[in-house]
Image (spheres, rainbow, N blue to C red):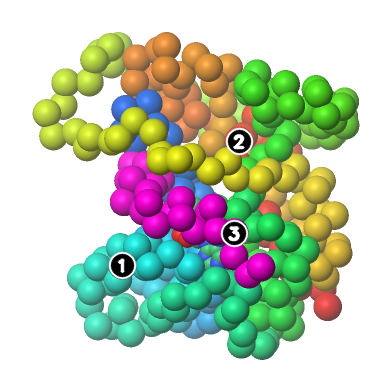
C-alpha cells in the first residue's frame, strides 16, 4: 500500500482548517507548522549556497515551499491531497513570475514519485506520522537525494508522552515503555549554554500578561470549527528512535531541534486566558537547539545527512 488512506481522507476533509491552525495563533491554538517553518528557514539560511534543488515531501498548502522559492532555490512539492495542493496553487498564483517559476507541484503519494539522485535537500514537515512503513519511506527519500544530500524532517515527539499526562502517558505505562522513555529523557539533561539562558531571560522579561483579557474580543478573529473531522492520531518517534531509523535507511543524524516547548503542564493551557501559555512556549524557544528541548517539546526536527 503506497498511501495511508485514513491520512489521505483526513487531509482532504480538513485542508483549510489544518492550514489555518498550523500557521496562525488563534484562540488557545499554538501554530506548530509556523514554528517548524521558522526553524526550517533558520537551517536553510545557514547554508550559504544560493541555488539548491529542494523536494518538499507532503508540501500541503505550500507555506514552506513558497518561502524556500523566495530564497532563490528551486523546489518540487509532492502531496497526495488535491485539496491541499489547490490551497498551495492559489498562493503560488499570487507570486511574481520570478518566484513562482522556481516551484513545481506534483499530485502523488510520495512512494510513487521516482527521480533518482536529483535533490540537494528534502524537507518533510508533519508527514512521517502518517506513513505506514517508516523505513521504506526513508529509504525511498534516500534514493531521491544526491550524494551527501540532507533530509530535514519533523516528528511528533514520543518522549513528550511522559510530560503530557494524557491518554498517551497511560498508553506508555500500559505498554511498559514508560521506563525506557524516562531513561532517554534523563540523558538529555545537560548543562545549558549561557547564550540560551541569556536569550530565555531576555524573552521572559519581554512577556506582558497584564494586557491579556480572559475573553478575546477581537471582532475580526478567525473562527475555527472546534475539532478536526475525524481526527487522525499521527504516529510518534523519540529522538533515539529517529537515530535508529536513520541508521537503517543510510542516514546520519547531525542535529535535533525541539518544536512547541511546554513550560508547564499542557492541560493548563485552556484553563488560562488565551496567549498566556503560548507566550511562555515562545520564550522557551531560546533552548530549541539544546538537548533539554527534546524533553519538553511535543515535536522535534531532525537534520539527517545521507551516508550511503
Ligand atoms: C500535516 S500536513 C503538513 C503540510 C506541510 N508539510 C506543512 O508543514 O505545512 C501533512 C501533509 O502530508 C501529506 N501526505 C501525507 N501522506 C502522504 C504521502 N504518503 N505522500 C504524499 N503526501 C502525503 C498530506 O496530504 C498533508 O498535506
For residue 103, above or below residue 286: below
Q: Would you say the residues marked 2 and 1 are in contact, meaning their CB atoms lie under 8 Å apart?
A: no
Using the image as rendered, state which of residue 201 and residue 221 is in the foreground: 221
Q: For residue 142, what is the image quadrant?
A: bottom right
For residue 81, above or below residue 101: above
Q: Residue 86 shows which numbered tag? A: 1
Q: Residue at x 49, y 58 (%)?
A: 8
Q: Position of residue 169 (x, y in %)?
A: 71, 23
Q: Position of residue 226 (x, y in %)?
A: 34, 30
Q: Is mark 3 within 8 Å of ligand 1?
A: yes
Using the image as rendered, state which of residue 225 and residue 290 is in the foreground: 225
Q: CA distance from mark 2 to mark 1?
A: 29 Å
Residue 196 can be seen, yes or no: no
The rendered magenta stretch, by its main secondary structure, is classed as: helix
Magenta extent: 1-24
- Residue to which mark 2 is pinned: 298
* 273 sits left or right of 33 in the view: left
Q: For residue 104, what is the image quadrant?
A: bottom left
Q: Position of residue 221 (x, y in %)?
A: 19, 33
Using the image as rendered, state which of residue 74 and residue 235 is in the foreground: 235
Residue 69 can be seen, yes or no: yes
Amino acid at each position: 500500500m503506497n498511501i495511508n488512506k485514513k491520512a489521505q481522507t483526513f487531509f482532504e476533509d480538513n485542508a483549510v482548517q489544518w492550514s489555518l491552525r498550523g500557521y496562525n495563533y488563534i484562540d488557545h491554538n499554538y501554530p506548530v507548522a509556523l514554528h517548524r517553518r521558522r526553524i526550517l528557514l533558520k537551517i536553510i539560511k545557514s547554508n550559504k549556497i544560493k541555488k539548491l534543488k529542494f523536494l518538499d515531501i507532503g508540501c500541503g498548502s505550500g507555506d514552506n515551499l513558497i518561502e524556500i522559492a523566495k530564497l532563490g532555490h528551486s523546489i518540487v512539492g509532492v502531496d497526495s491531497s488535491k485539496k491541499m495542493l489547490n490551497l498551495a496553487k492559489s498562493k503560488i498564483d499570487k507570486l511574481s513570475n520570478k518566484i513562482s517559476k522556481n516551484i513545481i507541484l506534483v499530485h502523488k503519494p510520495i512512494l510513487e514519485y521516482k527521480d533518482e539522485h536529483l535533490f540537494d535537500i528534502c524537507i518533510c514537515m508533519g508527514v512521517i506520522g502518517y506513513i505506514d512503513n517508516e523505513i521504506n519511506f526513508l529509504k525511498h527519500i534516500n534514493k531521491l537525494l544526491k550524494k551527501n544530500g540532507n533530509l530535514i524532517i519533523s516528528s511528533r515527539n514520543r518522549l513528550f508522552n511522559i510530560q503530557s499526562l494524557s491518554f498517551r502517558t497511560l498508553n506508555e505505562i500500559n505498554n511498559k515503555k514508560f521506563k525506557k522513555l524516562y531513561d532517554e529523557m534523563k540523558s538529555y539533561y545537560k548543562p545549558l549554554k549561557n547564550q540560551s539562558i541569556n536569550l530565555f531571560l531576555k524573552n521572559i522579561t519581554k512577556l506582558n500578561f497584564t494586557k491579556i483579557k480572559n475573553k478575546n474580543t477581537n471582532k475580526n478573529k478567525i473562527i475555527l470549527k472546534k475539532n478536526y473531522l475525524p481526527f487522525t492520531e499521527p504516529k510518534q518517534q523519540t529522538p533515539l528512535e529517529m537515530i535508529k531509523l536513520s541508521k537503517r535507511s543510510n542516514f546520519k543524524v547531525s542535529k535535533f531541534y525541539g518544536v512547541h516547548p511546554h513550560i508547564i503542564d499542557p492541560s493548563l493551557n485552556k484553563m488560562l486566558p488565551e496567549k498566556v501559555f503560548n507566550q511562555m512556549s515562545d520564550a522557551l524557544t531560546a533552548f530549541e537547539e539544546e538537548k533539554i528541548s527534546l524533553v519538553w517539546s511535543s515535536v522535534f526536527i531532525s537534520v539527517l545527512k545521507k551516508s550511503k
